[in-house]
Image (cartoon, rainbow, N blue to C red):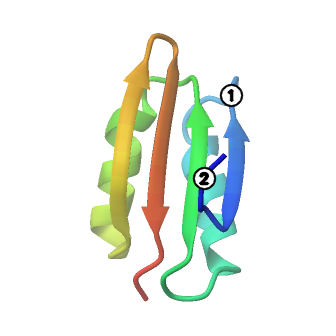
Amino acid sequence: MSNADVVLDLKGLLCPIPVVKVSQAIKSLPVGGVIEATATDPGVLADIPAWTRTTGHELISIERQEKLINFKVRKVK
């Protein structure tokens, strides 16, 4: 699928669960590790960028394709 270290399926989960799952998963990654996730809750379009700003991690990409939202986050610290 990709070069992500962790792939999360967040489809069907509503705010704040996708952010909680990403937050939990990133703890187990080394610095530079990448999480790729797919969600259906449009709230992640605002929540994930806000979460990366507050935590200092890097939002590599976020894109919406119809009902699916795919995003990648890199662990910075």
Question: In the depicted view, which residue is nearer to us: 52 or 67?
Answer: 67
Q: Which residue has dot 2 on it?
A: 2
Q: Residue 62 location in percent, x, y? A: 37, 41
Q: Residue sitting at 59 percent across and 62 percent down?
A: 3
Q: Residues within 10 Å of mark 2 (few under 14, many from 20)?
A: few
Amino acid type for the residue under numbered disc 1: Lys
- Give the quarter of the image for residue 46: top left
Indicate which disc, 2 or 1, sits on the residue closer to the N terminus: 2
Counting from the top left corner in percent of width and height, residue 64 is at: 40, 24
Q: Residue 11 carries which label?
A: 1
- When the figure is inspected, residue 53 is found, relative to residue 47, above or below; the finding is below
Q: Which of marks 2 and 1 is in front?
A: 2
What amino acid type is highlighted by mark number 2?
Ser
Secondary structure beneath disc 2?
loop
Question: Does residue 14 sit above or below 34 in this rendering?
Answer: above
Which residue is at 31% across, 68% downward? 54
